[in-house]
Each structure stands twice: as structure tokens, then as C-alpha cells.
Amino acid sequence: LVSRENHDSRSVVSVRGVPIGGDNVTVIAGPCAVETPEQTLEAARMALTAGASLLRGGAYKPRTSPYAFQGLGEAGLKILADVREETGLPVVTEVVDAADVELVASYADMLQIGTRNMQNFALLQAAGDAGKPVMLKRGMSATIEEWLMAAEYIAQRGNLDIVLCERGIRTFEKATRNTLDISAVPVAQNLSHLPVIVDPSHSGGKRELVLPLSRAAVAVGADGVIVDVHPHPETALCDGPQALLEEDLAQLRDLAGTLAALS
Ligand code: PEP
């Protein structure tokens, strides 16, 4: 269902009217985690400054350590909905448990499936049933074929509004948090009609890598980028070191603008 075969053109996924795919280079930005109403609103304003048309933000955080901040849950979803009201930015947020899909979908405009859940098949099926577009991140140890098969689980439920997100894979290299597999973008685009975006924040794991990796993503033909921004990364409850600062936003905006003009 997600294969390029039998599809004459590449798909465009609409998230509350915002297109991902086709001639667009869509910027999604926001905080890694929703912490407070003020922090989320400030981050959303940063996202707008960066030229983003969708707001990201996690209310359910799948953390490696059970002692790390796990997210605000439904209270975080309410904050996201309020910030959407205030800014007009549609919301992309992660769901980590099949039992929560209905609740998350009642607030979100797009459901995010994270790297750790790429092969959580019950979750994929529930997300496929939810009636909302789904962003499927590549498992950190998954092959491209496994990633596309995971997308099939969603598509099989009758939902073809799927966006693939390359977010870095596990290699022997320790200088970056994950290794951005930039070749996965054209490979996945050749194999599948689905849009493919890149997460330069979770792949590099370092602020100074986010803009260079964003440039690489758009140069290779990605359909968009999803980027962490935070008004006060030094106090962030999640992934502060990879969040862009106010002074980085113009460069991201220029990048998005240049590419929009080229496409
Ligand atoms: C995220 O985007 O908030 C996230 C946790 O990403 P990943 O699943 O790629 O680690």
C-alpha cells in the first residue's frame, strides 16, 4: 500500500490544511516536551519565527530512563490545544500506547509514532484507525524495509495519510547522538509514495548540528524537517542541548524560504 509501485505520483499529506509532500518543504518546530503553558506558547512563537507551519511537542515522552521526565500526559495535550488556539499552528504530538490513541487523537492534528515504537504493531494499528495523519519515525535500529513494513500496518487500516521521518540510526559513531542516514531520504522516496521528512534534532543531538543537518535534509530532497526549539534550553526538562535558540531561527526560516522558492 505504501509502495511507489501502482502510484503515479508522490503523496501529499494534509495536516489540518498544511501540506507535507509535493512541492513543499514543511517546517515543524516546537519544544521536545510540553512543560508549561508559557514555555509551550513561547516555543510556538519561536516556531512561527522559524517559518514553521506545524507545532511539535511531546505530552507523552518515551524516555530511556524511567527516572527522566515522562511528560504531562493529558494536561500537556490541553496546553497544546490552547497554544493551537492562540497561534493557529496545528499540533503534532507523540502517542506511546495503543490505549491512549483515542485520547491523543482527540487533541492532536497529527499522531507521532516514535523511534522506540516503530514496531509496536498494536500501536500502529490503533493509530491507523484514529482518523488522523500519522508521522512514523524510523526505528533507530530498523532497516528501511522494516520501516516501510511498519507503515504498511498503518496503511492496512485504511489510513494512507502517513509521513515517514528519518531521525538517525544507531551506529558505532559516538560523536553524534544518532547517525543521520541522509541516504534514507531518497531511498525511501524511491521505494514509497509517502512524504519523507528529517529530524535533525534527535539525530545529531547537538544544537550546532541542527542547521547543517537541516540543510543536508533539504538538499537531498526531504519533504520537511522537524526541529526542537526551546525558549530556555538550559532549564529544559528534555533534550535541551539540541534545541535551537532564538538567534538560530532566522537561519532556519531562510532555509525554508529559499527552498520554498526553488520548488
Ligand atoms: C521526539 O520527537 O520527541 C522523540 C522522542 O523522537 P524519537 O522518537 O525520534 O527519539
Image (spheres, rainbow, N blue to C red):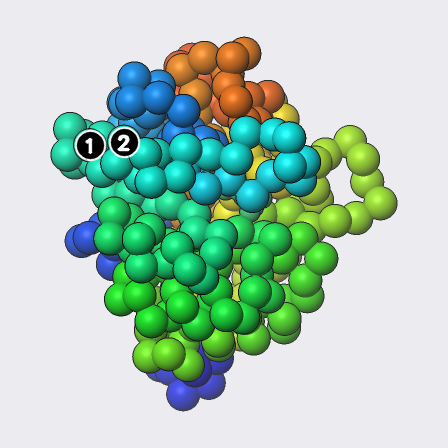
Q: Is residue 93 visible?
A: yes
Question: Where is mark 1, residue-wise?
Answer: 82
Q: Nearer the viewer, residue 11 or 221?
A: 11
Ligand 1, seen in the image, is in the quarter at top right
Q: At 39% from the left edge and 55% from the top edge, which residue is drawn?
A: 100
Q: Secondary structure at mark 1?
A: helix
- Three-letter amino acid code at the position of disc 2: Ile
Question: Where is mark 2, residue-wise?
Answer: 79
Does residue 250 appear left or right of residue 221 in this picture? left
Instruction: Please tell me whether residue 82 is drawn above or below residue 142 in the rendered image.
Output: above
Does residue 67 appear left or right of residue 47 in this picture? right
| Residue occupying the far right of the picture | 172
Label pair 1/2, CB-CB below 8 angstroms: yes
Q: Secondary structure at mark 2?
A: helix
- Three-letter amino acid code at the position of disc 1: Asp
| Residue occupying the far bottom of the picture | 6
- Circle 2 Cα neighbour tier, 10 Å, few/some/many (<14 / 14–19 / ≥20): many
Q: Position of residue 221 (x, y in %)?
A: 47, 53
Does residue 163 appear left or right of residue 147 in this picture? left
Q: Position of residue 223 (x, y in %)?
A: 41, 53
Q: Is mark 1 within 8 Å of ligand 1?
A: no
Instruction: Please tell me whether residue 169 is drawn above or below residue 127 in the rendered image.
Output: above
Q: At 33% from the left edge and 51% from the top edge, which residue is drawn?
A: 104
Q: At 63% from the left edge and 73% from the top edge, which residue is drawn?
A: 145
